Every structure is written in structure tokens, then in C-alpha cells.
Image (cartoon, rainbow, N blue to C red):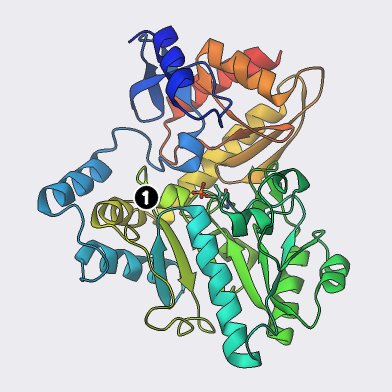
Amino acid sequence: MKFQEVQNKDKAYIASTYNRFGVAIEKGNGATFIDVEGKKYIDFTSGIGVNAFGVNDELWKKAVVEQVNAVQHACNLYYTLPQIRLAELLCEKSGAKKVFFGNSGAEANECAIKVARKYSALKYGDLVRYEIVTLKESFHGRTLATLSATGQNHFHHYFGPFPDGFVYAEPNMDSVKACVGEKTCAVMVELIQGESGVNVLDKTFVVELAKYCKEKDILLIVDEVQTGNGRTGNVYAFQGFGIEPDVVTTAKGLGGGLPIGACMLFEKTENVFAYGDHGTTYGGNPVACAGAVSVMERMTESLLKEVNEKGEYLKEKIKKMPNVAGVDGMGLMIGVRLKGERTARQVAEECLKKGLLVLTAHEKVRLLPPLNITKREIDEGLKVLGETLR
Ligand SMILES: *Cc1c(COP(=O)(O)O)cnc(C)c1O
């Protein structure tokens, strides 16, 4: 099928919620994609941080195919090995005590919201402490509750009434303290705000916030849907901030390409849920879990070192490019602040024409290349980016 035909059919049959770029991806290898017309692209997106080890990754494919050949689904009424193995790995790598599996980032956050509310209900009574403080410019998902949790007004139209109980603070202690009250059960933050522009929270603020939450018995939920699973050069970004959250959610890169989300429960929250409190048909599906196990088994010191080195290399090169005001981020989660006339979307469109896929995040160009992107692919991508920004 030629691109024009693909686009026409998409327009005819797919709900028009996405402002798609003009390319139909057919296949790929590593951080290189081929579109339906045979044109090649370097991929600095990983499908928004999902394809942790790129496309056609042998270890992930082997794990997934073996599981497909064994059993594709069994539902959560029965035990399945990949789910248990993955939970064990996640606990080992994060320090969490228990895990609940869902199918997406939004679902992982829904779970965290439920955990926070039940924790407080058990301890302080039902409907006494239910409010969750989130940050302005945050992004937590597209379900009604996670939209409500998202601290950006433009997400709060059309679909009301939204679930109650979310308050939005600026990323500083004065503002957080002003938002915390009798009803507060949790604070939920992204340590690096992804969707709104790769904004890294100030470390002093994060450390103080964690301490403050502990003192007040307010749960600290860290949304690592995007920052998790090696993306920022730690297995989880919170490890780089030196804090101990009560709940950590993750998704995106965890599955390496298949839908999965995890809500990780730490010491205070590990026993909050009882039978029947929460559930999902697909969550922890054996195929998705088998793929995720192959991702998490590779979260080694040497991989993390590699992620940090590649991130530094990219940042150094991009800083010197024309029309760049600055570069933000950690590891392979990078935001490029632009100066000059062009918007991030325009830069992304021009990169695409020249054979490079990049993302935008508010006014920045956002880069989330696969963790195993090669030096050659990085350099090819940088060449296009540099030419585009000139
Ligand atoms: C992508 C994202 C989500 C939502 O994840 P979905 O899988 O799209 O539901 C939530 N939080 C953060 C920080 C994200 O980046």
C-alpha cells in the first residue's frame, strides 16, 4: 500500500484523535525504520520510549515468540510464570515489595490512586483523606481520573464531571505545602516531566518533598511511566534522586513493545490491597510479561553506563547546534530548547523529511532513542538534526 492510500484509509476509519506525522512505518531494525515506500529513518523516539531495545531485538523476540508458542493468555485466576518472574525482577531492581500489573501507564496510575486512597481509608477512615497533590504541567494519562490528576488545564475540557480530589502545585515546597491539607493522602510527581517538555525537577525540592511526605504520612507516588526501565540512566529515576517513594508506576519501556503497566508497592503500601480490591483481565498477560522480563534482565550497570554516555554525547553535540537555546534531561530522555522562528513541530516535520524521527513536548523537541541505539545511528540522526536546525 502506498502512503497516500494508507492515509486515506486512516482518515476514513480511524477516530481522528492523533495529529500523525506523514509516514507509515512498515518495519525496522534497531533504531532504523523503513516506511511503506521503502524510505529509511533513524528513530530517536522508540515509539515514545516503548521500544527499549529498538525494533527486531533478538532477545525480546525470542522471549515473546517462545511464550506465544507456550500459552498466550491464561487470565489472573491462574498463576503464570512470566508474571511472577517479572514481579520478582521489578522488586529486585526497584526495592518494591509487591507489584500490580495493568496494561498501560494510565492504568498503573489509576492503581496508584486507588492504593493511596485505600491506604488512607484504612488508617484515617473512609473519605477523610482522599486528595492527591500533583504538579502543574504534569501528565498522568488519559482515563478520567488520570486526566483529572494531570495538572494542565487544557486536558480538563469536554469530559466532565471529572473525578474529584486532585490539587495542583508548583514544583516548590511552598506551593506543595499550600496545597496539602487535612484531606491529602498523597503527592504524585513525575521526576522528569515528559509530555510537558522534559522538565527535570530540582533535586533539593524532591528530597525535601520526600521528607515532608514521610513526616505527614502522605504517600509519595512517583510516576515513572516514561522515566522508568533504564531510560534516564538509572533503572528508575527516583534512584538518582536518592529518595524512597511509597508507590512507583511504570509502563512504556517496560514491555519493550507490548502493552503492560506496573504499579509497584513499597513498604508502606505492599499490603493495602486485599482480594477483590482491584483487577484486570489482561494485566500481567504472559506474552507481555515474557517480553518485559527480557527487557528487565538487561538492566545492568553496563547498560545504564552506556545510556548515560550516549545521553551525554547527544547533549554535547546538540548544545553546539544552531538555534538551540539549551538541552535538558537525563540519560536518553532529552529535551531540546529551541530559539528562532520554528516551532518544535516544524522542526520535527523537517527532520522527518530528511529521515529522522523525533518527538515534541510542548515547545521542545524531545528525543527518546532506543537504549541500545548504535553510535552510527546516533551520528546519522545528529547529522540530520544539525542540518535541520541550521
Ligand atoms: C505516557 C505517560 C502516561 C500514560 O501512559 P499510557 O500508557 O499512554 O496510558 C502516564 N504518565 C506519564 C509520565 C507518561 O509519560
**Is 66 located above or below residue 161 in the figure?**
above
Q: Quadrant of residue 365?
A: top right
Question: For the N terminus, which image quadrant?
Answer: top left
Q: Secondary structure at mark 1?
A: helix
Q: How many marks?
A: 1
List x then y, in percent, for residue 170. 82, 59
Residue furthest left in the image: 70
Left or right of 24: which side holds 167? right
List x then y, in percent, for residue 50. 44, 42
Query: Can residue 234 be seen here?
Result: no
Q: Residue at x 81, y 17 (%)?
A: 341
Left or right of 142: which side holds 306? left
Question: For the C terminus, which image quadrant?
Answer: top right
**Disc 1 designates what residue?**
255
Q: Residue at x 48, y 58 (%)?
A: 107
Nearer the observer, 215 or 137: 137
Nearer the observer, 353 or 332: 353
List x then y, in percent, for residue 82. 24, 62
Residue type, mark 1 in image: Gly
Q: Is mark 1 within 8 Å of ligand 1?
A: no
Q: Residue at x 49, y 42 (%)?
A: 49
**Is 129 located above or below residue 241 in the figure?**
below
Nearer the observer, 168 or 195: 168
List x then y, in percent, for residue 137. 74, 49
Q: Residue at x 64, y 35 (%)?
A: 315
Q: Residues within 10 Å of mark 1 (few under 14, many from 20)?
A: many
Query: Can residue 387 be seen here?
Result: yes
